[in-house]
Amino acid sequence: MSNNEKKNPVLFFLQESWLLMVASIAFGCLLACLNAAWAPKIAQNEIDKFNKLAGNLIDTATQFQSVDEPIPVDIGKGKVYNIDVKKGIDADGNIVGWAFVCEGSGFADKIKLVIATDAAFEKLAGFGVLSSNETPGFGDKINIKPEDGGFYQPQFIGAPVGKLELTKTGDPGKHDDDQIVAISGATVTSDAVVKIFNTFLVPVKEAMEIRGLL
Amino acid sequence: MSDGTSLGKTFFAGIWDNNPVLRLLLGMCPTLAVTAAVKPALTMGFSVIFVLLFSNIVVSLLRHQLKPHLRILMFTLTIATAVTIADLALKAYLPDMSASLGPYIPLIIVNCIIIGRAEACASKNGLVVSIIDALGMGAGFTITLCILAAIREVLATGKIFEIPVMPSAFTPWAAMGMPVGAFVTLGLMLGGVNLISKKSA
């Protein structure tokens, strides 16, 4: 131990680390100010992204409004997701569909989806991908929209709200059954999307029926 | 090192002689990960330029106060702040690009180019030299990423910035959009640079 340290360890500590402490406080304040300035814009971007994806799925909806309180969904292992279900409303104020965000583990990272259903919550209107990090050329085919030639997303349109089943073979052109044909070479990602539907769809529907929303 | 010729030399060293990707082999992770298309490569390049400038300016201004045994902590603190600012700015003003780049923006914190220039240049030189060094290194990184991305995007999709540039008979090489395409293209670029250097030596 040096003489300085022996005399007053606190003073020695301050002499050595004052610059680090001052910089920490200054940078912290800078980040806090920037976060306060940009957080509303970032939150609005999230809302806009949801509205865009949900609007593509329920094209008669002119706006989306949250219903009541978020619906808690227990996905097991003590984990509970609070699902903010939004009703799609057309120009006349009628409910034309429902949409909500949910997520699950994919092959590489979490997959975040916007799931949409019809107004009766009986048939799916499809899904959109909010965020994913799946293998390019394989798992990322879940992002390809029907209008861009994707075959995976259209299978969910018109499918019944209930347990879906992933198959490796079959006719991806059939849209009104519970069979979903996997993307070749991306079974894990395909299964992950189906699992997300199976985890959240039925509990959300049951909770909405209990609340008298359906 | 304060006259115009030296500053020019410092700037262009970052683009060719000390190019961080092609000569120093630094920043390989984002180089391979975000160069499937030119847009994300350009965004990553400008983000790195911003972080380099911020880091070099702060470190240069504080270089006489830095304790040797605490300088790495100070560098890391500065770089992390700059990267967080860049990340927030992208989320606010370029949300699609932020989503596309994903974890690679926060990973700029561990990009060796940034801390390497803080240690090798900014902590030993004045403000002007540090700024020029940051701009040169950042430009070198950005140009390299854009060239790599342009090659991969054209061969993988036949387009650049959604504009078709290949004839309609061209069959896209899907592999160029995948990691294997990144490794092969970067390897060929490195070989080409070494060949040019050997010939001019």
Image: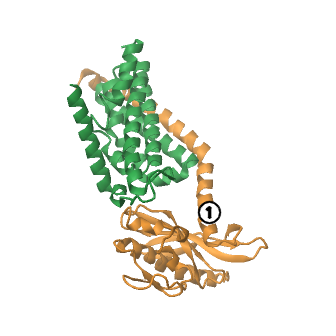
Chain colours: A orange, B green
Residue A9 visible here: no
Residue B16: image x %, image y %? 32, 29
Chain identity of mark 1: A
Residue A3: image x %, image y %? 25, 21
Of A77 and B150, the residue lying toward us: B150
Q: Residue at x 43, y 28 (%)?
A: B135
Q: Where is residue B69, by image quadrant?
A: top left
Residue A191 visible here: yes
Q: Quick check: B10 above or below A153?
A: above
Q: In this rendering, would B193 be left or right of B75?
A: left
Q: Residue at x 48, y 86 (%)?
A: A178
Q: According to the image, label 1 marks what residue?
A: A52
Residue A148: image x %, image y %? 52, 67
Residue type highlighted by circle 1: Lys
Q: Quadrant of the C terminus of chain B?
A: top left
Q: Quick check: B57 above or below B172?
A: above
Looking at the image, which residue sits at the far bottom? A177
Q: Residue at x 39, y 18 (%)?
A: B7
